[in-house]
Amino acid sequence: MLRVVGQNPRPDGSANPLLTAQPVEWGRGFHGEEIEDSRRFHWMGLEAGFRFASTGSLRYLEISTYGHFHDLSQTLRSYCADEAATFDLTPGWMQLSIEIPAGADSCELTLNKPFPAAFYPGDERTLGVQIREPLLHADPARHAHVARQHSNARHNREEMLGGRIHLDSTPPVLGIDMYGVCNVKPPCVYCEWDFSKDLEGEHVDAPFDLDTLAAYGEFFDNSHQLVNCSIGEPFMMKNFDELLEAFGRQGKVLEMTTNGQILTDRNIERLVGHSIDLYISLDAGTPETYAKLRNERFEDILSNLRRLNAAKGGGAGLPRVRLVFMPMAVNQHELEDFVKICADLEVERMVLRPLNYSDSVDLRWDRSGYTFDYQKELLPFPRLVELSAEAARLAEQHGVALADQMDFGGESQSFVESFQSYPAQAPAEDPEPTADEDTPPEAEGSPPSSGEAPGEPTAATQPEIVEPALPSLGSEQEPICLEPWRSLYVLRRGTLPCCYGGEPVADFNSYREAWNGPEIIAIRESLAAGRFPTYCLNSPACPIVRKHQEAGDLPWHQKAKREARRGWFAFERATAEGWRYVLAWPLRTGVRFGVRLVKRPAQTLRETFGRPRGE
């Protein structure tokens, strides 16, 4: 029997709120339980309340809310006995902590406005905000942490909406670098292991421990989400348990990637009960393809995931498992196999994550009889769009929640139109669309078939139905990319403004200065003005820039700069010498010209400049 580490007493003997939590009853004003992303939640109307037993001491009610408004215009107000508090709701899931005075046996909640009904047509309910995970505890330190994190997130969004480029808030999302050693040797075929280790330089062996978190100060304390971006396997850390405890003590969510090969019973015990989004890199639907990418451990990973799912009590338990598929030339034919695996394992989400687009990566591996060439594995953008549409169709068909990272940062309208022009492939066994399927765009407006009666209305003669515009939720007030406002990645290889950043803007230890340093200030200033800065244009993996480029939204000079960069790296690969060839060209040409001029002066001058004077 696996024990639940997240519910065990803390090493220092202090009270664990998960261990001392008291029952909470969903009262009036809450709609029935629903499941999204394999997690239970309730919609709240405009008024609702929680019920619980009274005690003679101060307690705290912690809830997780999902705000749909981007402009801080929706507020939640709590009333407990004679105490009242107001919370501006930030978009997405966010923890809130409410003081429950001694003797109180209820907490009433009110919203200033509902989620607009236009977003859920046909649903007669009044929906306000999604709420999950009520936790009633007596830990004042945890309450202070959660309150500080929400205050910082709200202030950060306020500054972003106001166009501020020098921020008083700290990043709500903090990228961390927990561990730098991996258990897969040789590395995965698409991993620039040696190059990444070289970039870490003198910081390659820098520790990540409780002292590191203390040194981060408010950068750690104010963040509500941690993203581990290690070039390594976190389960190989000796101090993994104490770090998870520190993250959980402050109510933080940890995003963590693993190859899943050492999900032993012990490591499963360490995970269960912790608020972790666990990304498993699988990228294949069969053992044969997995062996071309890594090794022969495919079936072991599936077995590990089944044991993890059983230990955490199914899809509604913790951690939340995300199974990752990176479409490449080698695996694109296995998309449906992968979706079926996600359904069989009952993972919380399938993640479609394109292979990082980079003209400079020059990885070649021969593995399991297959030659993997990074540049040849990169799929053309139209093909990625097709696979995104196909993944959405397959995920819906098999009941799998999908997170498509092609959607990172939202989409320009031109991209939406471009995406819709690539219909999902129909299943091989049912090539004709049924009445329940969308009509492919190319079929719209086509002439009637021979079976149609003359004069019968067709798609071409039907009046176009224009859907009414949805009410604004405030997203139009946001810059074209939010990352330099809300995130900072403090990695051994350098400090980056986002997870897709190219070159570091500062050293590993200079993150404080970098947060409001000239490089990030310039990035924010450009994005706030609606244009991409040079830094983003020089970050080839950024999906936002690429979507705008493919949709034709980039100004001509920015597109030309991107194309010139692509041409340069293509030239480097083609010549194998690249820059050395170009820099040496004038010298080589001059030497050859001089030698020929000495040997055959008249012929050399005639060939080079035309007919010399006097001839």
Image: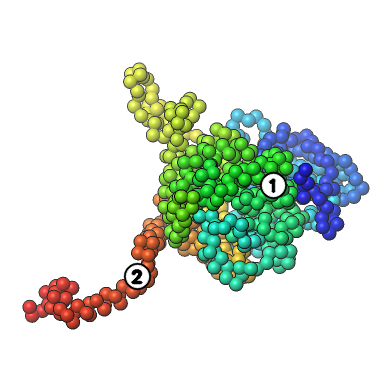
Any part of residue 444 in sight:
yes
Q: Position of residue 359 (x, y in %)?
A: 43, 59
- Front in this rendered view, residue 75 or 62: 62
Q: Residues within 10 Å of mark 2 (few under 14, many from 20)?
A: few
Residue at 56% across, 53% down: 478
**What kind of colouring is applied to the model shown?**
rainbow
Q: Quadrant of residue 111?
A: top right
Contact, CB < 8 Å: mark 1 with mark 2? no
User: Quarter holding the C terminus?
Assistant: bottom left
Q: Position of residue 133 (x, y in %)?
A: 74, 43
Circle 2 sits on which residue? 581
Could you say which disc has been placed on residue 319 in the image?
1
Which badge, 1 or 2, comes first in the chain's sequence? 1
- Front in this rendered view, residue 488 or 20: 20
Secondary structure of the residue carrying numbered label 1: loop
The kind of residue tagged 1 is: Pro
Q: Position of residue 159 (x, y in %)?
A: 62, 58
Any part of residue 84 in sight:
no
State the residue lying farthest toward the bottom: 598
Residue at 44% across, 52% down: 371
Q: Residues within 10 Å of mark 1 (few under 14, many from 20)?
A: many
State the residue lying farthest toward the right: 56
Please count the marks in the image: 2
Quick check: 185 left or right of 610? right
Q: Quadrant of residue 141?
A: bottom right
Cα distance between the residues tagged 1 and 2: 52 Å
The kind of residue tagged 2 is: Tyr
Residue at 31% across, 73% down: 585
- Front in this rendered view, residue 230 or 176: 230
